[in-house]
């Protein structure tokens, strides 16, 4: 299956690359950071705010949208883009991870996973086929497959093996369901290397916990299926940095270079750069908005805590190099006052700034890969933020 992904430049010293993934809602420059709009909203921000901070693609969630407001409701209202007034790209997580992390009850069978809603305890069944249907009703640009995610820091290998085998069988069913839903691919390559895309794309999810041999097997299996890209799932769940890095390499070493790779739910900016180095193209995380709501701000000088008394009379912006709405309009003194007073506007302004920090960081990453200076850029970044 052709992937509408155009690699512009590969780094010579590492596996980093920069490119463009084309979706129905336009081009997404990679490596990309995708803000998390789990329930059709990035916490404290509007879709206009998200454009302001240069978000290209949002991550939303099938499990949450299926339970509330309901995917049929979204379909009736014209789909998620119209519902939340967002004209950029949207990727939906299949909900596999949420079934395992949020639901009090779940039972996996060959057919799918039966679970109880974390809202009201009602019973629901997710199958590889109906998850594709739900994503079609949501109308997202990139659909992901139902997977079995082991939500454990230190899983036994036989459990990881069983989860992987089930994920593989479900992936084959999801790929068939996708082909029934989108029987004709409307993707054409133009002369300048860009693509015109008229349908939603399918990404497979690679599991295998922290075991490089299972990760390799999962990658090779997924590479044999007709998909447009790959998700790396089941990591950033408490494993060591070494285990994470090894698991990522075991995957990216065995995937075709021509398709994008997305690390699901990766933590901090430093971890993101470590994975860019290992050939990952797409990232999402609630980290920048979550820490913003605690008063932590990322700047070009490093981290700062807006609660600190030293900002009470500080008339500088949060970051002199940042072009976000908060930095263009407000002083540290004002933002510090808002935060200490419990004013909700501080959540919005600090969240906008932190997301812009991430999108600016990714702009610099792309420029460094293009110029052949990624390795030294990454080393300087880690010195400042680790
Ligand atoms: Zn800013």
Image (spheres, rainbow, N blue to C red):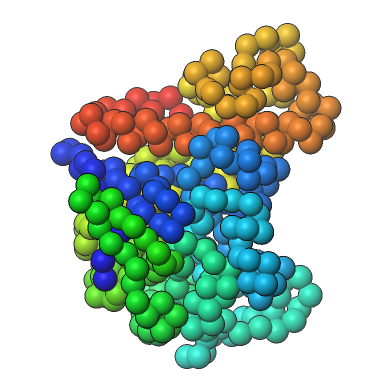
Is 166 or 320 nearer to us in this picture? 320
Seen at 63% across and 38% down, the residue is 49
Compared with 340, 5 (above or below) is below
Q: Number of labelled discs?
A: 0
Residue 327, given in percent of the width and then of the height, sits at: 61, 21
To which quarter of the image does residue 17 belong?
Answer: top left
Compared with 97, 270 (above or below) is above
Quarter of the figure with the N terminus: bottom left
Residue 88, given in percent of the width and then of the height, sits at: 51, 50
Q: Is residue 122 left or right of residue 152?
A: right
Can residue 107 be seen here?
A: yes
Can residue 3 be seen here?
A: no
Seen at 73% across and 31% down, the residue is 346
Seen at 68% across and 67% down, the residue is 77
Residue 354, given in percent of the width and then of the height, sits at: 57, 33
Quarter of the figure with the C terminus: top left
As drawn, the residue found furthest toward the front would be: 191
Residue 203, given in percent of the width and then of the height, sits at: 39, 66
Q: Is residue 273 left or right of residue 16?
A: right
Q: Is residue 222 left or right of residue 91?
A: left
């Amino acid at each position: 299956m052709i992937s509408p992904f155009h690699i512009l430049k590969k780094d010579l010293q590492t596996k980093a690359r920069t490119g463009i993934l084309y979706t129905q809602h336009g081009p997404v420059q990679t490596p990309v950071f995708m803000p998390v709009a789990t329930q059709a909203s990035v916490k404290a921000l509007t879709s206009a705010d998200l454009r302001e901070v240069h978000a290209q693609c949002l991550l939303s969630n099938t499990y949450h949208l299926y339970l509330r407001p309901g995917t049929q409701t979204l379909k009736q209202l014209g789909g998620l883009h119209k519902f939340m007034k967002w004209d950029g790209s949207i990727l939906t997580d299949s909900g596999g991870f949420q079934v395992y992390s949020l639901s009090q009850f779940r039972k996996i069978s060959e057919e799918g996973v039966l679970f109880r809603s974390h809202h009201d305890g009602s019973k629901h069944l997710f199958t590889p086929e109906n998850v594709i249907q739900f994503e079609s009703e949501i109308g997202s640009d990139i659909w992901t497959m139902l997977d079995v995610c082991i939500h454990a820091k230190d899983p036994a290998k036989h459990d990881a093996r069983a989860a992987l085998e089930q994920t593989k069988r479900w992936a084959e069913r999801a790929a068939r369901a996708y082909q029934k839903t989108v029987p004709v691919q409307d993707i054409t390559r133009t002369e300048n290397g860009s693509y015109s895309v008229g349908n939603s794309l399918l990404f497979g999810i690679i599991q295998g916990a922290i075991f490089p041999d299972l990760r390799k097997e999962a990658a090779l299996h997924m590479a044999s299926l007709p998909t447009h890209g790959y998700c790396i799932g089941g990591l950033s769940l408490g494993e060591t940095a070494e285990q994470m890095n090894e698991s990522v390499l075991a995957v990216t070493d065995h995937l075709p270079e021509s398709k994008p790779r997305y690390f699901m739910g990766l933590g901090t900016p430093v971890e993101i750069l470590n994975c860019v180095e290992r050939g990952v193209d797409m990232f999402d995380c609630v980290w920048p908005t979550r820490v913003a709501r605690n008063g932590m701000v990322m700047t070009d000088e490093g981290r700062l805590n807006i609660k600190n008394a030293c900002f009470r009379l500080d008339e500088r912006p949060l970051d002199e190099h940042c072009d976000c709405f908060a930095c263009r309009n407000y002083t540290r003194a004002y933002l510090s006052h808002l935060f200490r007073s419990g004013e909700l506007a501080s959540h919005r302004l600090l969240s906008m700034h932190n997301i812009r920090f991430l999108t600016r960081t990714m702009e610099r990453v792309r420029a460094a890969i293009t110029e052949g200076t990624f390795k030294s850029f990454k080393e300087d970044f880690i010195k400042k933020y680790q």
